[in-house]
Amino acid sequence: MTGPRRRLRPPVDPYILALLGMVVLATLLPARGVAAEAASGASTVVVGLLFFLYGAKLSTREAMDGVRHWRLHLTVLACTFVLFPLLGLAARGLVPWLLTPELYGGFLFLCLVPSTIQSSIAFTSIARGNVPAAICAGSFSSLAGMVLTPLLAVVLLGSSGGGFSADSALKIALQLLAPFLAGQLLRRWTGGFLARHRRIIGFVDRGSILLVVYTAFSQGVVAGIWQQVTWPRLLALLAAEALLLAAMLALTWYGAPRLGFGRADRIALQFAGSKKSLAAGLPMATVLFASHASLAVLPLMLFHQMQLMVCAVIAGRRARDPEAAGEPAPVAGPGTA
């Protein structure tokens, strides 16, 4: 018990600090002219590489092993792609007196992003929940998000998202879905290499996203993003995101027993159903929003750090629940209740 709690203590993810560092760098030294074109081209390449790696690393067999627990997975998908978007649409009432239309577009976009995999698994494990279910639920959400996120963005954001159209869906298919499927098809040959060099691949993943953030915010700074996002607007955005996260945490936790889920599944549902993936959302935003990506990326970055801090506290408390005393984290099949 002591070990997991120690690992939860750092309140700020160091990677978030690196991402914020890219925002500061782009603010002080934005890429312009030829440098901007080079950064944009490199960003396009690394986004394709990122989704190829996502496809190559995602175990299809592991995901399919969880089909038997379909009720939980469908519930997570409903939370991610139905409840979140509905709450995002309800926040439209905050425009323009609290949020600008551009910030609201980013807020709504984060509601359309798939769930996380790694952090959902980690927090579920610490809280002694159903870890196999969290693995499968996160995998299903990532797979579904490849199709559902761009389609929902086209339908719900429309012209407010920087010119969404059928061309945007085609662009997503070519730049994101095609590399992802290629990674899945080549996983038989690349899986061993990726497993042996997991640390190096992790650096490539994170380094690529840092470049994406720098490129997006460079474009935003040149376009005058910091004249559009004032401190009062930023605080309003944080308040709206705090309410969004609180609502999803409450709905997943208190709604689970009504759907017949036991404690272990309830924990997996709360952590997998209340979070959004920064790794998947950032590259998608650069493709879907183009020159407006910085305002779409900002709400997602803030929400990501908020969810990590809050869920770390919740996981620690769940691990100390009387119900969890003396119980190992479930490691059997996904049907463990």
Image: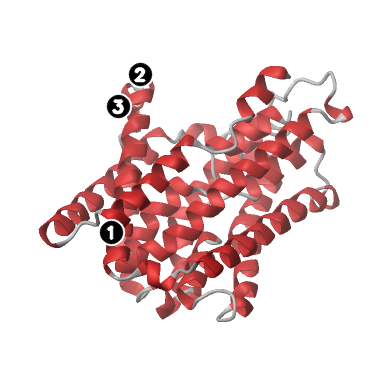
Instruction: Specify the amino acid type for callout 1.
Output: Ser
Is residue 182 shown left or right of residue 271? Answer: left
In this picture, is 22 found above or below 229?
above
Which of discs 3 and 2 lies nearer the camera? The answer is 2
Instruction: Specify the amino acid type for callout 3.
Output: Trp
Which residue position holds label 1?
A: 218
Regarding residue 269, the answer to whether it shows in the image is: yes
Neighbours of disc 3 within 10 Å: few (<14), some (14-19), many (20+): few
Residue 196 is marked as: 2
In this picture, is 5 found above or below 51?
above
Residue 189 is marked as: 3
Q: Which quadrant of the figure contains the C terminus? A: top right
Neighbours of disc 2 within 10 Å: few (<14), some (14-19), many (20+): few
Label 1 – label 3 distance at C-alpha: 37 Å
Label 3 – label 2 distance at C-alpha: 13 Å
Extreme residue toward the left, this view = 34
Q: Looking at the image, which residue is at 65% across and 74% down?
A: 90
Q: Secondary structure at mark 3?
A: helix
Q: At which x and y percent is residue 156?
A: 51, 74
Instruction: Specify the amino acid type for callout 2.
Output: Arg
N-term-proximal mark, 1 vs 3 = 3
Is residue 104 shown left or right of residue 70? Answer: left
Q: Secondary structure at mark 2?
A: helix
Residue 51 appears in which quarter of the rendering?
A: top left
Label 2 – label 1 distance at C-alpha: 35 Å
Q: Looking at the image, which residue is at 39% across and 67% down?
A: 226
Residue 12 is marked as: none
Q: At which x and y percent is residue 53?
A: 34, 38
N-term-proximal mark, 3 vs 2 = 3
Q: At which x and y percent is residue 133?
A: 65, 36
- Are the two marked residues, 2 and 1, in contact with CB atoms closer than 8 angstroms? no
Q: At which x and y percent is residue 126?
A: 68, 28
